Amino acid sequence: MTEPTIYELSSPGRIGVSYPLPDVPLSDLPVSLLREDLPLPELSESDVVRHFTALSSLNYSLDTGLYPLGSCTMKYNPKINEETARLPGFAHTHPFQPENTIQGNLALIFQLQEFLKEIGGFASVCLEPAAGAQGELVGVMIIRAYHRSRKEFQRVKMLIPDSAHGTNPASSAMSGFEVVPVPSDVNGNVDLTALKSLCDATVAGLMLTNPNTLGLFDQNVLEVIKIVHEAGGLVYGDGANLNALLGIARPGDLGIDVMHFNLHKTFSTPHGGGGPGSGPVGVAKHLLDFLPTPLVKIVEEGTEDLPPLYGFSRPKHTIGRVKAFYGQFGMFVRAFTYIRMHGSDGLKKVSEYAVLNANYLLSKLKDTYVLPYKRMCMHEFVLEGCWADAPGIHALDVAKRLMDYRFHPPTNYFPLIVHEALMIEPTETESIQTLDRFADAMLKIAEEAHTQPELLKEAPHNTPVSRLDEIKAAKDLVLCCWIPEDN
Amino acid sequence: MKIQANLKYANSDEWVAVDGKIATLGISDYAQGQLSDVVFVEVNASVGEIVKKNTTVATIESVKAAADVISPISGKVVAVNEPLSNTPELVNSDPFGGAWLLKIEMSEPAELNNLMDAKAYEKYCSDRSH
Amino acid sequence: MFTPHTQAETEAMLKAVGVERLADLFNDVPKQYRFPKLDLPEAITEMEALTELKEYASANETVDSLACFLGAGAYNHYIPAAVDSLLRRSEFYTAYTPYQPEISQGTLQSVFEFQSLIANLTGMEVANASHYDGATATAEAGVMAYHNFRGKRSKILVSEAIHPQYHEVLCSYLCGFEDIHIESGSSKQDPLAVPDSMIPQIDADTALVLVQYPDFFGRVFDLTELARKTHEAGALLGVIANPTALGLFKTPGEFGADIVIGEGQPLGIPLSFGGPYLGIFATRKDFARKISGRLVGETTDGQGRKGYVLTLTAREQHIRREKATSNICTNQGLMALAATIYLSLLGKQGFKQVASLCYQKAHYAAKKLNALKGFKVVSTTPFFHEFILKCPRPVSEINDMLLNQGFLGGYDLQRDFPVLKNQMLVAVTEMNTKDEIDALAETLAEVPND
């Protein structure tokens, strides 16, 4: 059943929310500059509430059920975070208020900077980047600025493993780097021989995701980092998979020079149907000066009676500002709340159980699905979504059929190095009962793939819409539901 | 997989038809199969433009992939298949004929020697899809 | 703590996996770096966390207790109750990016509606699903213009009257490249130069001409001539627009803008100390494939039912990788939903009302403040809801005084434009009552103006 659009529900003259009449004497409007027509819909408040409530019912969500999406870390979004972020003391502060009126905000930013420094093993953290991809861009820009500050303009290449998330090469290209892929070896680690041969004085660095997108901790990670460092390059860590490492290992300790965090993955801030996220960046000592501006620092130390005075600081050789204001502040409050409720032991428990859950699921599925890398996984693992003896069945079909079992499918077709990949990450907030149900569904689907393949090919059957014509969407390109007459 | 015998092929799946000094470019049947349903074609080079070997001259987009068409030869662009942008599906149905992309007046005909003939390309393709 | 496992369950799972203890799961981690003790404060319960966060929050003053006359890119507007009520539906906020359209029609249709509203509001043909904020949307406009000309045009001509932080971000994204350069339309000595004064600088090397509408100083200009000259030179016109102003004023699309970007925070999004906000990006249909960011398109399913999907995804990072239009992945989905709900609730009439109230109250305030001895409203051109007030003393002093009297004074323009000495950017919205404005005038009247 389709829900009409707001334009289709519109009724000329209908009023939703209204405002008071002007309480001031009126001034003239500049008539020649006014618009003639304002093509917005006209709905009552009740219309709007019913419409969006109906739309919400068409969505699967984390509060509905499991999202085993590899590299997305779909963990439970604590409701307390929604309360703290909405405290008027935070939500009703203007970003340009005088510093003495927003000491609470500055203190929180400072503390979160400190927490992430400690968790990641870094010398400094900037919270400004708006999402993981922007954090990556910042990281790559920092690497570029570092080499240029040392007059090493010949370092134009960025090495990127073939298993990397697409944002890695995209961010590198945006920074003007030439992207050079690095192969993985048969064990899913970065191929050391290949890496050695690629590392020379033209290499700016390596973008490393560890654990990687296969869910595997690189067994030679120290060697990998050493090789790059010895060639004069820097190592960027993609922190998307940090959920496996909290209290387990600190990327900074391993030698990572710069890394982005994803608050909307590891630190439980909600995904919002596509954002907002938040991608703070941490750096080692030698990169401190290049961070984006501004950071928050203590301007005057506190005393017994008075809290510290906080203010802004501008890194000496900053790459500049990457966003207006200070970052996704509302997400900082949520992540801060989360970290306070976990502490060091709690965070370690998060990673321990994230990894246990993944390995447990793996143990239940590895005999029925092809497992390309037969190692203990970290917080996620990759299976092949196809069988030689089930011709015509692709990972896509498995994914679509899972929806009939009321689960969101795992990540599809990524990483690129696994044929028909299904990347599964349960996260630590799922119970053994949920995992068992999911495993059962996967096993049933595997059987169906062999005995009743049409169930998969025509899936999903039980959803508000069935498979959609993506070709038609791209060709017809209807991106708007109301086109003004004069276009 | 279809192969047209009288064409030359690049290992990035472009085909070249030679007629005197004029080379016509397109993408092979193998390539369109990899892309699946093509929804968009854009030739980036305009008539009169000089293109160098190994530069991108066109972009072809399907629902699940986007590919750059790289010219294996250098020269001056003398014709562009403008109507193709209205019927991108021709790339799938008629990759060697109606879906030609552009014609180049070659400046270095010797570059053709870097390309494969039909038989070599056929083997190359079958080696890839193991 | 949100891990549900009991002791018994943990043991059963360890057994199934084939290890004895949780620590055995991490043997690939180099021993010398394994299991660091993190120096973080002890964990607290939910109850204690709320108390602690309230302490942080109460160490701030807010626009609830202070009369706000501060704008400069973030505005104190009224947010109807239904916006947050709907936003808190967990089917919206705990949902993931709609990569599986069959179970994400709620998100997809609301994004389609957002795209439609923004296109209509700005007078453009196509809008994307959002960027991070107005500043990054501006930077992406620069990137798009550059790629449009395939590097053959290297100049981005930027009005000095755009938000200084947007200018900074544009530079962060583009300044490091040899074949792009950002040129200012005027000099820092003359930030109030009108947009048309940039015309002599538009040439065959210009890829993009960038202006703000209303500009950073609140002024509204007719962009017809600028658009004409820009197009004559074969360049693109980018307009950074305030969405509330578009409730009243001619759209950038009508003037001939090629790209419209802006900050959507005024559309139902709280001030929240600067984030999360909402980047708006709209353009002409010709450029649909060049846009960065997500796009939702309409289509049908196997049964002929109307449905929505992410489309033109081949441009994006997860497919195109280093050749992607941008690296953007997660955007500002929930904020776009907030804007969609806000615009739906206000509709044609309500949105025009808000814009009118902002205009009227700002003009009333300007008249009252201009009448004060020692103060002068600098703007002579039409303005929307912000204006420059020249003060008899440094703005920082005045704002300290105002703060003591319960006001949040305007933005100190001297911070970014040294030549605008003692000049304050005052913002007025529908949230400011006549009494508040009168009180502001009375308080400023106390300022010594020798």
Image (tube, coloured by chain):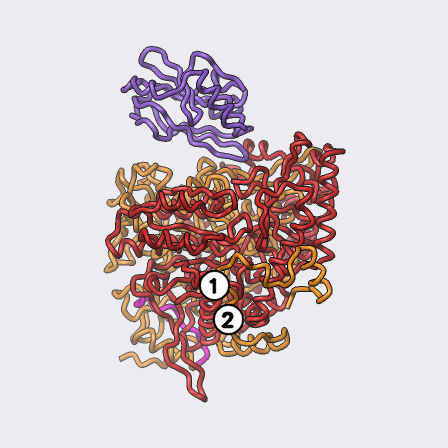
- Counting other residues with Cα less than 10 Å from the Cα at mark 1, is it few (<14), some (14-19), or many (20 or more)? many
Element assignment for label 2: loop
Q: Which residue is drawn at 45% across and 82% down?
A: A307
Left or right: residue A163 versus residue A81 is: left
- Apparent colour of chain C: orange
Left or right: residue C272 versus residue A55 is: left
- Counting other residues with Cα less than 10 Å from the Cα at mark 2, is it few (<14), some (14-19), or many (20 or more)? many
Which of the 4 image quarters holds residue C418?
bottom left
Is residue A231 located in the magenta-colored stretch of the structure?
A: no
- Quarter in which the N terminus of chain A is drawn: top right
* Image location of residue A358, percent across then percent down: 63, 54
Is residue C410 located in the magenta-colored stretch of the structure?
A: yes
Chain with red colouring:
A
Q: In this view, does B110 lie above or below C152?
A: above
* Image location of residue C431, percent across then percent down: 52, 67
How many numbered marks are there? 2
Q: Decide if residue A58 is in sight here.
A: no
- Apparent colour of chain B: purple
Element assignment for label 1: loop
List the residue tagged with mark 1.
Answer: A250
Instruction: Please name whichever residue, A75 or A30, is drawn nearer the observer in this view of the structure.
Output: A75
Instruction: Please name whichever residue, C88 or C258, is drawn nearer the observer in this view of the structure.
Output: C88
Read off the magenta span. Answer: C405-415
Left or right: residue A480 versus residue C209 is: right
Q: Which residue is drawn at 39% across and 28% down?
A: B70
* Image location of residue B17, percent across then percent down: 40, 15
Do the residues under discs 2 and 1 have CB atoms within 8 angstroms? Answer: yes
User: Which disc, if any, is residue C38?
Assistant: 2
